[in-house]
Amino acid sequence: MWALTALLLLVSSSGQAATLEKPILSLHPPWTTIFKGERVTLKCDGYHPLLLELRPISTLWYLGHLLLPSHKKSIEVQTPGVYRCQTRGAPVSDPIHLSVSNDWLILQVPYTPVFEGEPLVLRCRGWYDKVVYKLHYYHDGQAVRYFHSSANYTVLQARASDSGRYQCSGTMRIPVESAPMFSAKVAVTVQELFRAPVLRVMGPPEGRGAALGGVVLRCDTHLHPQKRDTPLQFAFYKYSRAVRRFDWGAEYTVPEPEVEELESYWCEAATATRSVRKRSPWLQLPGPGSPLDPASTTAPRAAALAPGNKPLFFRRPPVSRSVPSVTSVPSTTSTGLQFPASGAPTAGPPACAQPTPLEQSAGALKPDVDLLLREMQLLKGILSRVVLELKEPQALPELRGTPETPTSHFAVSLGTPETTPVES
């Protein structure tokens, strides 16, 4: 009767048995390398539903692909190899690699993964805890720390650059002081806590903020699966100025007047203690004059429309700041050119004449040169805004409110001193 009741409870729990998490395998002491003849304890901890608790829980132990005879929750081992455990109804645990050494010196590292921002502790141990003198620690062949006698080497906040191959050396008195001895090299990998963030355009604000206008930006990143419960904070910047300091929200609404400068924004993600901080690249937008692409990875919700059912545009066309140029237009008989009635046009090349190779190459290069000049002028304007904002922030709104005078292009008609504008 009790077994049937427990079975009903298990079935009504939305398939709980099918979603059991793998057990956690731990090592005590927490070092993956030991001396020959020493023993360590392995412990298997897992979650067991009600149905499985009605009878004794058995644990399966594996050494490589060999099933060990013990069914206890913890076992003592001294054989090198890869150990795993499994509880009834759950998947197999993550492995632990145990090494056994017969050297005078061993370098011990923790069995658990080390993530960015966490302490990394290395232990150089002499044969059966003999004191090690003149102790050196090495990282990728370079000495990083010296101790007069036995001591652990600790990196308080590990970084990806701390990954590599470590080694230690020292002397021991057996019974007199020996020559320097070296341990075997041990590989250490510092796991990435979370990826570098990417700033994305989400579209216009929703709800109460819709009436205020603007654009919502989101700072996206992904935590390591084993650290998915780690809380992160986010900050947003415009150029080098923080527009919102670190907070728990991953979204920021750009005010309507600043939407034209979205490419000057970037964001930063960090842990609550700031032990790990990563910044995003500058915000990337689609090409000039194009609306946000809904299929683009930089705008997952870019299909939103502005008032009037018009696509959102975040780039403004570059404004030319060059002086008015005077363009000489040769006089021909083609349609669209008007000559003064008082003078006859100067004879020019026939309309059907083929352009020379030099003229063709010059015509092909002219659009590229014009585009380069426009981009240089745009860059000059952006740098001017940055300098002005850094020197006199209060003067920037006045500058934004001043309309810029569009440039005019003039053409000179032959035979008359007057200039007539040519509309493009």
Image (cartoon, grey):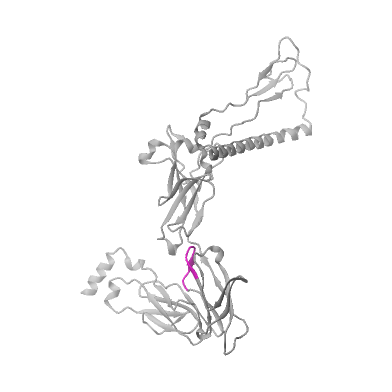
List x then y, in percent, for residue 144. Answer: 59, 70
At 55% from the left edge and 67% from the top edge, which residue is drawn? 163
Kindly tell me whether residue 403 is visible in this rendering: yes
Main SS, magenta region, reads loop
List x then y, in percent, for residue 63. Answer: 46, 80
**Quarter of the image with the C terminus in it:** top right
Q: Nearer the viewer, residue 13 or 307?
A: 307
Q: Looking at the image, which residue sits at the far top?
A: 342
Q: Quadrant of residue 340?
A: top right
Q: Nearer the viewer, residue 2 or 199?
A: 199
At 46% from the left edge and 61% from the top edge, which residue is drawn? 224
List x then y, in percent, for residue 203. Answer: 44, 42
- Taking the image as shown, residue 42 lies to the left or right of residue 186, namely left
**Quarter of the image with the N terminus in it:** bottom left
List x then y, in percent, for residue 375. Answer: 63, 37
- Taking the image as shown, residue 161 lies to the left or right of residue 209, namely right
Please give the range of residues in magenta.
111-120
- Taking the image as shown, residue 287 lies to the left or right of residue 305, namely right
Q: Nearer the viewer, residue 80 or 121?
A: 121
At 24% from the left edge and 74% from the top edge, which residue is drawn? 3
Figure check: 238 above or below 127 = above
Figure check: 153 above or below 266 = below
Q: Is residue 50 magenta?
A: no
Kindly tell me whether residue 184 is visible in this rendering: no
Q: Nearer the viewer, residue 152 or 79?
A: 152
